[in-house]
Every structure is written in structure tokens, then in C-alpha cells.
Amino acid sequence: MSAPIAAGLTDRRGVPLQHRAGRALGLAGLALVLLATLTPTRDIRGGSLATPLLCLVCGDNGGADVANNLLLFLPLAIGLRFSGASWLRSVVASALLSFTVELLQLLVIPGRDASLSDLLTNTVSAAIGATLGPALPGMVAPPPRRAALLLAGGVAALGALLAAWAWLLVPQAPPGAVASRWAHESPGPGAFRGVVRSVRLDGVPMPPNGPPPNTASLLRRLDRGTMTLEVEVVSGVPVAYDAWIYMLQSRWGGVLELSQTGREARVSVPTRGVNWRLGAPGVSLADALPKAAGVPVRLRATAAAGRVSVASSYHGVERAVELGISPALGWIMFIPFDLAVGERVRWATALLLGLLLLPLGYWAAGTRRLWPAAGSLTLTLVAALAVLPAAAGFPPVHWSEWVAGALGAAVGWALRGSATYLQTPCASPSDNESSSS
């Protein structure tokens, strides 16, 4: 495995532009890896200390960690391949980097958990990136026939991704026993700094530390995606980390959780993804709790008909936010930090949809068949944003998703024209068969 990727255009010094682009992408990928893995964190709940070194799917969010690791080394490995490195060298270099990172996390970096899972999944990520690298130049300015194939593959991949997210976002309470837990009334680190006065779930008082009454009926309602959680607290000093206020907990972690970060209040609801060790989707309300300690606050969270809301009341002022769950919100289950605050989640979801539709618009324009290509993009949008949510039982998606999807496809279509000059170098012998390492 030694042949580099096709060089393509060159600069004034005769250096292939693809190699220069590869170096830039590789450096960006390296920066991403170092930032994502070596930044110290405040592990208030003690997750890093509880992670076994030899585990493969580690902790309550182990599934999300595996998925993120499979993406983490893609830019670095693709950049190495673009710069001329062989498949083997790209993978070995990435594996050595991952091993170094895990060693630093184990011995030096506070709040990070080293594991065999990270090393293996990072190496697999590099192998995927090194394999995909040679195929990417052929996607930049493909001939019409290949553009049509890429468009069909992209539509299928987008549909599969959104369908998987929709399936994982379906409400589902984990099997087995659950326990009701109030902050400071039951053991557990990272608790709310204030005082919990009362908790009612669907009108039923919840015990401070123990099994809830009529557990079977409660779990059936959570399986249907309906609940009303009412919590009365006395505020504490705001903290920068995620401090739990109330938790309905199973052996997988929080089934239903109300927490505070800064002055935000967040509710996380149970879905099928929790059973796959993904993060629980939810919504956060800004300024839900006061700056000062000792203030009585009433918090209310609801879930019904695919919509989740959080409301708070103190000093005579009421605040509320509501979020309709849609398949495109599946990214929330994988992101290790909270972007689901108020309207911020809509902007993040819109940006993601635009990026997902951009290559489809790009390849659609490359087919040089205007109306069939435009029709396929329209059908893709309708299927992704109307048919799939309705079939999964979700409410109609927010208008921002439609706008973002259409804009992403339109921008991709426009960009295809600016890439026309690459058609000749990219349609080299590698147009039919990518060079291998």
C-alpha cells in the first residue's frame, strides 16, 4: 500500500494543490483531535473515575462516545491521504496519536477518561478516513453519470440517517426498576446547590429517595411520551456544571432528569436512544433560575404529542420554552455539550440540515438534467421533513428546517458551477478507478 492519491493541479513550485489541501486539512484535523481530547473538564459526577480502562462501550453515554470517536479522526486521516501518505502510514500515525492521547488522559489531563474503546474506535475512524480519502477527488467535479450515482447514494444516506434518528427518538422508558431521587435527599455527586421542596410527576408526589408509587403505570405513560413534572425548589448558587435537581433513575442512568447549568434549567426525556447509551434529548430554558440563592422557584416540565417544554416562575415572572421533536434533532443525542437552549437548538439544527443537503444540491447540478434533478431534491425534502416525521409520530417540523434544507441544496447547486474548472483534472483515469495505496 504505497501509491499516493492522484495529484491533480499543481502550484507555481510544482507541488500538487491536493497535497497542500491535504496538509491544511490534516493540520485542522490534528487541532480538532487535540482540542476534543486534551481539554481538561470538570467531572463533577465522577464519570471518568468510574470508567474501566478495558471497557468497550463505557458509561451512560457510551454509545454516543463510540459514534463521536468514529468521526473524530476522519479529517486527519483524509488529510494525510491527500498529502500523499499511504493508507498504512495514515492509520498507524493516527493510532499512535490516539494511544498518546489516551496515555495523557490517564496520567495528566483532569476529568478525562481513557479507555480501550477510545483507542480502538479512533483507529477505526482513521481507517475509514484513509479508505475514503482516494474517492473524494472524484466527488468534486464528477461527470454527469457519476454525479447521478452520487446523488442517489447521498439521498439514500440522508434518508437512512434521519430514519435512524427518528427511531432512536421514539419515547421509551428503560426496562427494569426505577428510583425517584431528589438532590441531597439521595446520594450522588454533582447535585443542585439549592433545596428541593416537593416533586410531583403527573400529579403524584414522588419520594425523595426510593421507588415511585405505581411504577408500572408511570412507565407506561413515559413510553407514550407524556408526562408533567412539577418541582418546587429554593434556589442555590448557580454553577457552571450540569447539577441535577431531580432524577427518575434506572440502571442505565437518568430516565427523566431535571437539572441546572448556570441559570438554565434543562429537562431530559427518555427515548429509545437511552437504551443504546446515547444522550437523552431535551430542552433548556435560559434564566429559569435566579442569580441569588434562597429564592423560591417553581419549575414545570411537560412532554406530550412529540413536544417538550420547560417553564419556571419566580419573583412573579414566568418564563417558558417549547421544542417540537423532529428526526433532524437526533444530533442532540451525540453532542457532549448542550446546544438545546431556547431557540439556539433551531439554529444548530438548521445549520446541520443545510450542510447535509449541500452536497446533494451540488451533485444534482452535476447531472446536467435540470428538472429531474430539481424534482429529486424536492422529493427528498418532502420525504425527510414531512413524510418521515409524520410516520414516526412527531409533530410537523419547524419552518426553519424547510428553509435550511432548501437553502443548503440551493447553495450546493450554485457551488457546482464554480467547480467546473476542476472537471478536467478530476476526470482523470481515477474517474473510473481510484488509485489505491
Image (cartoon, helix red, strand yellow):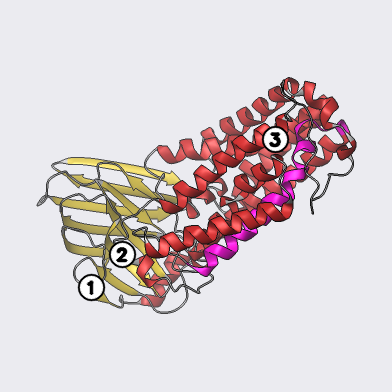
Q: Nearer the viewer, mark 2 or mark 3?
A: 3
- Spot occupied by residue 131 in the image (x, y as percentages of width and height): 73, 51
What residue do we see at 71% from left, 46% from top?
85
Which comes sooner in the sequence, label 2 or label 3? 3
Gap between marks 3 and 1 measured at Cα: 58 Å
Which comes sooner in the sequence, label 3 or label 1? 3
Furthest-left residue in view? 294
Classify 10 Å Cα crowding around label 1: few (below 14), some (14-19), many (20 and above): some
Classify 10 Å Cα crowding around label 3: few (below 14), some (14-19), many (20 and above): many
Which comes sooner in the sequence, label 1 or label 2? 2
The answer to whether any part of residue 203 appears in the image is no
Prevailing secondary structure of the magenta residues: helix
The reply, left or right, for residue 85 in relation to residue 325 is: right
- Spot occupied by residue 342 in the image (x, y as percentages of width and height): 37, 40
Which residue is labeled 2 in the image? 45
Do callouts 2 and 3 mark residues in contact (Cβ within 8 Å)?
no
Q: Nearer the viewer, mark 1 or mark 2?
A: 2
What residue do we see at 54% from left, 45% from top?
30
Q: Nearer the viewer, residue 155 or 422?
A: 422
Which residue is labeled 3 in the image? 19
Which residue is labeled 1 in the image? 186
Please determine whether, in this image, residue 86 is positioned above or below residue 368: below
Furthest-front residue in view? 13
Gap between marks 2 and 3 measured at Cα: 45 Å
The answer to whether any part of residue 339 appears in the image is yes
Identity of the amino acid at label 1?
Ser
- Span highlighted in magenta in the image: 115-144
Identity of the amino acid at label 2?
Arg
